[in-house]
Amino acid sequence: MQKLKIRGGKPLFGTVSVSGAKNAAVGILPAALMAGGGCVIENLPDIEDVRLFMDIFRKMGADVEFDGTSMNISGEGMRNPKADFELVGRMRASYYLLGSMLGRFGRAEVALPGGCFIGVRPIDLHIKGMEALGATTWLERGVLMAEAPKGLKGADIYLDTVSVGATINIMLAAVWAQGQTIIANAAKEPHVVDVANFLNCIGASVRGAGTDVIRINGGRELRGCSYAIIPDQIEAGTYMIAAAAAGGDVTVRNVIPTHLEAVTAKLMEMGYSVTEGDDGREFYMQVRSDGQRPRGVNVRTLPYPGFPTDLQQPIMALLTRNKDASQVYETIFEDRFKHVPYLCRMGAEISVSGRVATVYGVDGLSGCPVTATDLRAGASLVVAGLMAEGVTAIANVDYIDRGYENIEGKLRSLGADVERTDN
Ligand code: EPZ
């Protein structure tokens, strides 16, 4: 494991460009394995989850070449729908191989997923969807087995909880099911729409993505295509929050402003200047801050278009200096406050009761050794380190590398004093 060392207290100035969306990439790559011929996927982020998928796909017999931005991927050579147990257990999104392999081969063998420990994170809705389409599923020594020897048949599926993963996984399988599948109470996140757009690009018929009812007419031939991933709204939001926290004037480029409305509104409510613009080639968000303490605000995480749970941890770091007391209500995951003890070690005053954290404002934070416990907890500690007086050493930065491409390079380009060292 490696460390990031940040000497805080320096305002950030300049421009940072956002990479492709992690949570779109991890849905689109397993989908690309379903297309006859090869796909070219552009604007991929060079992050751990993408590289881990490459290893998994190669072990399954796929051809994969990645240059750090574009991937040539073909599942033509695949004969084995079984994913490597150890590799699959290292990420959450490996569960998408369930839908894509079940659809393509009529069988899938995928170890139960790993990923950030922010709650129990069951996959009962994924299984409910596969079984509704006609598959039989069972657990065999930690491996989720699924098979549909007679093929899949379209069904009406209601998701009891809005689930990004279940929505995408069911879409992947449903494109192979004969007839129409309806997913009701579907997730509406931008990455759900991006996966649906990709599926249509390879020849599927997916309608309604971005609303809470998605209709898939399955059984169509799937052929390879070239496709560019959308920008990562969580990475973009993280840099917007970092700019407000450290102070300065930062332009975050290669964004889709509508995907950032919740975090833009919240930063403006806190008293920061956030403006949107475009230079004729791409959209950008500009955040200006004189490092002032934010107004106290309440944050409630909700499915899109609500405030994203993935930015709850980063924005809490900014809130540690708020002028009043703020409540952060995490409605999506039951255990997504593991960053709180480390923020308190840096001088924050936060009390947690169940899913609600109350953040009492302090004048400032002090740098010290801390540890990333999950991806966005790590991002929270980066924001705190940029604000803090002195040096913050963040251990387990490999968690951060799962979702942020070249984080120290991008921060250094904004004037931050940050370096990566071995633990
Ligand atoms: C995806 O996780 C993202 N991960 C998460 O991002 C993100 O926080 C989350 O969606 C919510 O937006 C990927 O896309 C790889 P869910 P996922 O299914 O699919 C419950 C990050 O930091 N649920 O939408 O696991 C679940 O427990 C990561 O980038 C069931 O009960 O999230 C949770 O309470 C962290 N049964 C709620 O639904 C199920 O079968 C939402 O989970 C599935 C989910």
Image (cartoon, rainbow, N blue to C red):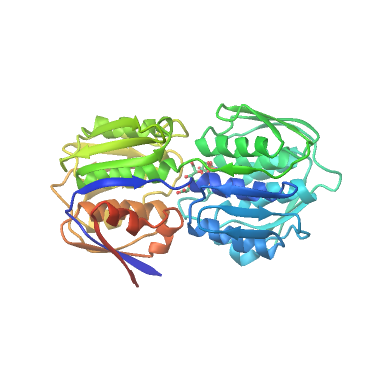
Residue at 64% from the left image edge and 50% from the top image edge: 30
* Residue 161 coordinates in the image, percent (x, y): 56, 36
Residue 389 visible to an observer of this rendering: yes
* Residue 60 coordinates in the image, percent (x, y): 70, 62
Q: Residue furthest bottom?
A: 422
Q: Residue furthest front?
A: 280
The foreground one among 409 and 91 is 409
Report which quarter residue 368 is drawn in. Answer: bottom left
In which quadrant of the rendered image does the N terminus lie? Answer: bottom left
Is 276 situated left or right of 325 in this image?
Answer: right
The foreground one among 347 and 5 is 5
Is 192 situated left or right of 280 in this image?
Answer: right
Is 322 situated left or right of 118 in this image?
Answer: left
In which quadrant of the rendered image does the C terminus lie? Answer: bottom left
Q: Residue furthest left?
A: 363
Residue at 46% from the left image edge and 44% from the top image edge: 333
* Residue 57 coordinates in the image, percent (x, y): 65, 59
* Residue 137 coordinates in the image, percent (x, y): 74, 50
Q: Is residue 421 above or below residue 42?
A: below
Q: Is residue 174 above or below residue 340?
A: above
The foreground one among 166 and 172 is 172
Residue 244 visible to an observer of this rendering: no
Residue at 78% from the left image edge and 39% from the top image edge: 221
Report which quarter residue 316 is drawn in. Answer: top left
Q: Total marks drawn? A: 0
Report which quarter residue 318 is drawn in. Answer: top left
